[in-house]
């Protein structure tokens, strides 16, 4: 399925890892540094993690790649990324593009005032 701007949604990925620990927490600047360049948690509802969703990242240099959410909803990458980036989450038939670009100063998707209580709220599909 393709949305109105031509983005082809990604089907659910069946085989994923555990996602390790602490879904919904700051994956980049909290208790230890994992070396992630982009990380967060995606949900199917307010509290239910979404496993197997694709987070498509397109960086300032035009490089595009998918990060797959793990069993606990966590997604993360250590790939080199040129910020700012555009991000679209998908799990066919649902597609949710971010309304703004992500900059290098945002600290991670679960931190920095964006996808936290009091900010935009958690990332979720649909």
Image (tube, rainbow, N blue to C red):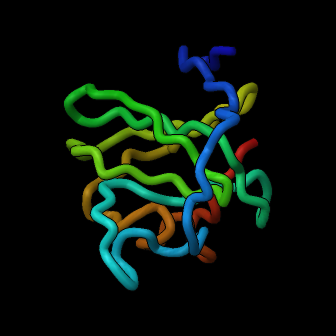
What residue is shown at x 50% (from left), y 59% (from top)?
40
> Looking at the figure, which quarter contains the N terminus?
top right
Q: Is residue 61 left or right of residue 98?
A: left
Q: Is residue 13 left or right of residue 44?
A: left
> At 75% across and 26% down in the image, what residue appears?
93
Q: Where is residue 68 shown, x and y percent of the image?
A: 54, 41
Percent across and percent down for residue 87 are 45, 40
Residue 110 coordinates in the image, percent (x, y) = 50, 68
Residue ranking furthest to the bottom: 31
| Relative to 66, residue 6 above or below | above
Q: Is residue 11 above or below residue 89?
A: above
In this rendering, the answer to whether 21 lies above or below 99 is below
Nearer-the-camera pick, 111 or 26:
26
Which image quarter: residue 106? Answer: bottom left
Question: Toward the viewer: 111 or 70?
Answer: 70
Q: How many marks?
A: 0
- Res. 60 image quadrant: top left
The C terminus sits in image quarter: top right
Task: Identify the residue at image location x=43%, y=57%.
Answer: 39
Residue 57 lies in what quarter of the image? top left
Relative image position of residue 85 (x, y in whole percent): 33, 42
Residue in the image at 72% along x and 58% along y: 49
């Amino acid at each position: 399925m393709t949305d109105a701007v031509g983005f082809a949604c990604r089907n659910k990925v069946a085989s994923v890892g555990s996602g390790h620990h602490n879904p919904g927490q700051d994956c980049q600047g909290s208790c230890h540094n994992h070396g992630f360049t982009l990380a967060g948690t995606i949900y199917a509802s307010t509290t239910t993690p979404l496993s197997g969703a694709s987070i498509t990242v397109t960086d300032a240099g035009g490089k595009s790649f998918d990060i797959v959410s793990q069993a606990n909803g966590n997604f993360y990458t250590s790939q080199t990324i040129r910020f700012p980036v555009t991000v679209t989450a998908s799990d066919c038939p649902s597609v949710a593009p971010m309304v703004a670009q992500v900059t290098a100063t945002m600290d991670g998707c679960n931190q920095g005032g964006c996808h936290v209580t009091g900010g935009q709220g958690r990332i979720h599909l649909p």
